[in-house]
Image (cartoon, rainbow, N blue to C red):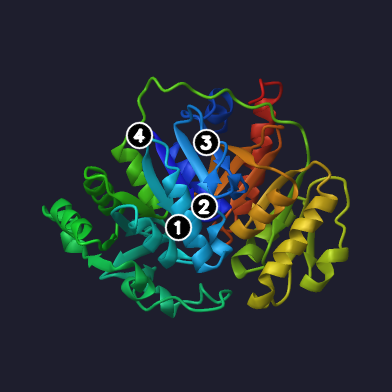
Amino acid sequence: MSTYVIADDLSGAAEAAAVLAVLGDDVAQNAQAGAPVSLELLSAGSLHGGALTALPGPADIFVVDSGNRHLTAPEAAARMRVLLAERPAGRDVFLKFDSLLRGNVEAELAAAMEAGPVAFCPALPHLGRTVRNGVLEIDGTPLHQTALWQAEPTGPGRSMAAHLANASPAVVPLPTVRGRDLADVLASLAAEGRLAVCDAATQDDLDLIATAALGQGIVLAGASGLAAAMRRSRPTPSDVPQTAPARIRHSPMMFILGTASPSAKAQLAELELTGVPIHRVHPEDIPAFDPGADGTTAVVVDGHVDPSRSGEIVRSLAELARRTHAGRHLVLSGGETARAVLDALGIRTLHPMSQPHPGAVVSVTDGGRLVATRPGSFGDRHSLTKILSIMQALEAANSGKVSL
């Protein structure tokens, strides 16, 4: 399966790469054999003069972090057009978006529709995120009735059609997804220039959507659940060369979390039980804070975070990481925070190696540094300790291996 992925933030890009490469948490398998496909993760810094530089070589999965999540809608649409125009020949395309519809989803999908038909579904059934009658639900509650957009400057639409109004959406209800006419309905919407917004309540529903869309050259767009369905629909041949495992250097770790949400607080409490010192820092204190240069440590933004200041806080965290990282492996929670930190450190390429749990991905740089990324809203109370354990195991298993 040769795939070109455009993701709108770094954690989503890493997640899509891990799902498409079928990475799990089996450290021994991943560390000794490398990923079953070769893949690269390029930043939007590769965009120069309106064209994508450093096009992929023989990689089977090529993932671009567009950085579109936090651009303006016109900027995100323009970048999507460039990235689709640079689509490598012979590759399926997957557009990775946030499962909670955050970012410039409407503008990017509208731009993608200019290049050809698109089918969209953000469902993640294993996390209770489903789409019914064109409404995204979280454990049965419509998204707009939850508090999951409380850190955003605006609110989500009451339905997918309302949220994506400028992309000419047309809802494909669950009975149609599960019926015999799905392929015909998608073809008809494609001919009309409509965006197919598909219901899905199970992974089987996503499989049906992927099979029907890919069979007609329709681009798939959505969350990692649809990426997994795409991978199952386009299985990787058994003779695909494996990548060489990386040499991972020995180093302590630095956790950077952009928010102390209720779930993050529980995760940090578990991490603290392992002996990792937790530094809870108020936003105004970040510029002068120094966690020290020795040992594994964690920094989390504590106190109320004004959404209008989120960009400023992310930049402060990136500068803190640049000043104090001391060569440590990194655990970065939140796509915007992760991207800003890696930009500050000049890291442009990641090689995903393991997926400790859905949404969390541990990658290695060409220089042997481990980088874990995770959306801020993902993971149970053991998320950070599981990531820590996996990173320690990868470090131990890969000592002395040939570097990428």
Amino acid at pointer 2: Gly
Q: Earlier in the sequence, mark 4 or mark 2?
A: 2
Q: Amino acid at mark 1?
A: Phe
Residue 153, by quadrant, is: bottom right
Tell me which numbered mark, 2 or 1, is placed earlier along the sequence: 2
- What's the CA distance linking mark 4 and mark 2? 23 Å
238 vs 309, nearest the viewer: 309
Residue at point 40% right, 60% down?
111
CB within 8 Å, label 2 to label 1: yes
Q: Position of residue 26 (x, y in %)?
A: 52, 34
Is label 4 or label 1 in front? 4
First-in-chain label (2 vs 3): 2
**Of helix, strand and loop, which one carries label 1?**
loop
Name the spot of residue 328 as percent of width and height, x first.
Answer: 78, 43
Identity of the residue furthest to the front in this view: 49
Marks 3 and 4, the one that precedes in the sequence? 3
Q: Which mark is residue 55?
A: 3
Pointer 1 residue: 97
- Secondary structure of the residue carrying numbered label 4: loop
Q: Amino acid at mark 3?
A: Leu
Residue 12 image label: 2
